[in-house]
Image: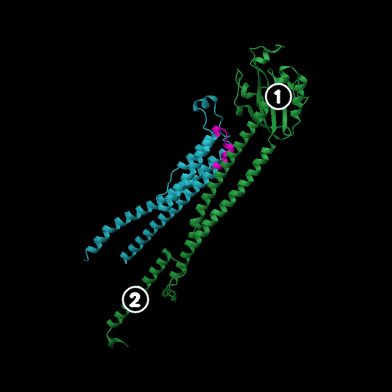
Amino acid sequence: MSQEGPQFDVQQVPGREALRQKIEARIRHLERASGNGLWSMVLFLLVSFFAFDGFAILPDLSDDARRMLGAPPPGEMISLALVVYAFSSIVRTLARMSRNIKPYTGLMHAAFFTAFYTFYQLSGVLQDNFWAVFFAGISVMGLDNYYLWSHSNAAVRKERALLESMRRGGEENVQ
Amino acid sequence: MLSSINSRAIVPVACAVTGFVIACCVLLYTFVKDDLIKGEIQHAADLSDTIIKSTRYAMLHDDRESLSNIINSIGEQNLVEHVRIFNKKGLIMFSPDSREVSQFIDKSAAGCTECHAGTEPKRSLGTMAKARQFTNNAGSDVLAITAPFYNEPECFNAACHFHDPEQSLLGTLDIGVSQDPLKRTLGQIQNRMIMFSAMVLVLTVGAVCSLLYRQVFLPIKQLADFTEDSSGDTLNDEFPEVSGEVARLANAFQKMTRRVRELEGQLQEKEREAIPPDSLP
């Protein structure tokens, strides 16, 4: 019996250390994922800043480029697409929240709202519709980021509790 | 800030709903504005058609005095900012403003470029393309529309034979109407939409908040208070005021606590029995 004790400790400590490192890596990953949402929001705000004055920083499209792109979609169709996109995104995020499904962490929303700004600009009606895209983007991405943040925080708390229980278990073994 | 269940449940959803409603209101306002402007353009186009038809007889008879009277009378209307007829070369022939008469129109100005942008001028335009909006020197917003006088058989077959049949366009009517009434209407619509949206938001968010508070958060708070007071007498009482899942949870907690107390009592009884009576002081 006296020989089994030290052998058990020798086998357990590396496994416990690996698990601890794995948990810490998971915590870092969750914290990084939570930050991704913020990056997406910052990107959207930056694009909105440039869109506010009609992308004046960018050069005007040449006639050849416009001919190549073809006729821009009508403003009404873009607005309809914006409402459908914002509505379905909010419903999807609320559904994810209610069923506790892993939140979305990518830059898709920022890319889509940038596309809406671009389409409005090409149709020549960005000035009238800027605030619609801005508030739709803020509400969709704000809700998404809130869910990502709260979900990540809950997961991090769980992982930290696991780490703490491991630490306590280790101390008890030593005693 | 987001530590309590109230704020965690209500604030994000309220913000998302508010943002979405604002976005929809902006889009709705844009739709209404576009529709009103299109209506205004159609109205101005109808007005220009009426003027063209009204001046037709005078033109066929080369009655310049009648034509000038018609144009002057139209120009006296309150909302008409300008009205002028110019010939194919761009020379203004009739206008209520005598300073404009015999002046050339700038073909590169807004309103002319729609037809004269290319090397060959366009012969016809859609109603919307004929219209232009600008702010005049007095700072008033103006919606102007240009309408062509086409050469028709009655024109080149008339007794005077003044016009060549090959000539497709004889001149152009340019009329500008003030957009002040439209701006006032849009301002009223905007204010009403803001008030309506604010009321809808306050009612929606307020109703959801109060219902959630009454049906969920308050019972949970009472349950938390009830369970925290585990050493008191309340555990022997029925959990009051609520029903449903929260009451079930409270009853389950009561049963569990009673069972724990019974077990603790039994354990203490067994410990007392296990101690020999002579070891007691």
| Residue identifier under label 2 | B262
Around disc 1, counting alpha carbons within 10 Å, would you say few (fewer than 14), some (14 to 19), or many (20 or more)?
few
- Of A160 and A78, nearer the camera is A78
Residue drawn at point x = 45 percent, y = 54 percent: A150
The image quarter in which residue A171 lies: bottom left
- The green-tinted chain is B
| Residue identifier under label 1 | B54
- Of A54 and B158, nearer the camera is B158
- Of A12 and B103, nearer the camera is B103
Q: Is residue A115 magenta?
A: no
Camera-nearest label, 1 or 2: 1
- Horizontal side, residue A80 vs residue B236: left or right: right
- The cyan-tinted chain is A
Q: Is residue A131 magenta?
A: yes
- Of A110 and B179, nearer the camera is B179
Point out residue A14 in the picture as x, y percentages from the top left corner: 29, 56
Point out residue A8 in the picture as x, y percentages from the top left corner: 25, 61
Please tell me whether mark 2 sits on a helix, a strand or a loop: helix
The answer, for residue A118, to whether it is visible in the render is no
| Chain identity of mark 1 | B
Residue drawn at point x = 54 percent, y = 25 percent: A63
Whole-angstrom CA distance, mark 1 to mark 2, is 105 Å
Q: How is the image coloured?
A: by chain
Q: Which residues are magenta?
A: A121-132
| Chain identity of mark 2 | B
The answer, for residue A23, to whether it is visible in the render is yes
Amino acid under disc 1: Ser
Screen quadrant of the C terminus of chain A: bottom left
Above or below: residue B97 compared with residue B233: above
Screen quadrant of the N terminus of chain A: bottom left
